[in-house]
Image (cartoon, rainbow, N blue to C red):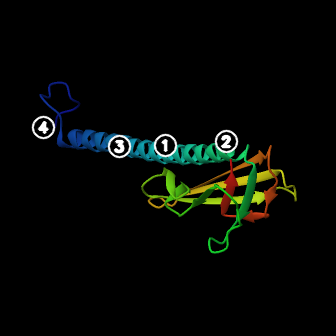
Amino acid sequence: MLKQGRCNDDGYSLLEVMTVLVLVGLVVGLASGAFSFVVNAYSRGSEQAWLQQEARAVAIFLERELVYSKRLAAYSSPESPPEFQGSFLETYSDGNAVLVDGQPIFSADGMEYELAFHSVSGSNSLLNIKVTINSRKTQRTVSVSKTVRLLNAQLEGTSGDRVRYVK
């Protein structure tokens, strides 16, 4: 005779166990997917913040370095730099680092640095500095621009990826 209901059963049927296992598997799968998404989003956000911070630090360094210069020239060709008498400093990027007189000031593994210097609206006392950093690992790129008012010098040249200056 067939039993009606579950009044005196001593366990669970195979169908009930399988249903619970499928539901638990779905919950665990969704939770691990959500966790993975959050971890990836955090690492992307952290790298983006680090790149932005690094680009701002380079721009602020260059601003402080150049604002009180006595003479300043922006140029692109290392073969024909502007002529300066006496001692001077030169800032540029070789791709792997930001260099001042050949000494790395900012560098990081897997990062590519690019500098650009431009006069603003034809003014010889306003210099726009653009710092671009590219992560070779994730291909993320961050650019920061900063306009500097030159207090003691007039900008020679209109643009370039190098700058030569006298402090």
Q: Which residue is drawn at 73% across and 43% down?
A: 68
- The mark closer to the camera, 3 or 4, is 3
Identify the disc placed on residue 64: 2
Q: What element carries label 4?
A: loop
**Whole-percent x and y of residue 85?**
70, 60
Q: Is mark 2 on a helix, strand or loop?
A: helix
Type of amino acid at the residue the image marks with label 2: Arg
Question: Where residue 56 appears, x then y in whole percent?
Answer: 62, 44
Residue 8 vertical position relative to residue 103 in the rendered view, above or below: above
**Tags 2 and 1 in contact by the CB under 8 Å rule?**
no
- In the image, taking residue 115 as reference, residue 33 lies left or right, namely left
Does residue 27 appear to the left or right of 101 in the view shown?
Answer: left
* First reached walking from the N terminus: tag 2 or tag 3: 3
Residue drawn at the location 16% of the way across and 38% of the way down: 2
Give the amino acid type for the residue marked by disc 1 in the picture. Ser
Q: Position of residue 18 (x, y in %)?
A: 23, 44
First in residue order: circle 2 vs circle 4 = 4
Q: In the displayed structure, would residue 33 be above or below residue 115? A: above
Q: Marks 2 and 4: which is nearer the front? A: 2
CB within 8 Å, label 3 to label 1: no
Q: Are marks 2 and 3 in contact (CB under 8 Å)?
A: no
The residue under label 3 is 32
- Split into 4 quadrants, where in the image is the N terminus? top left
Amino acid at pointer 4: Met
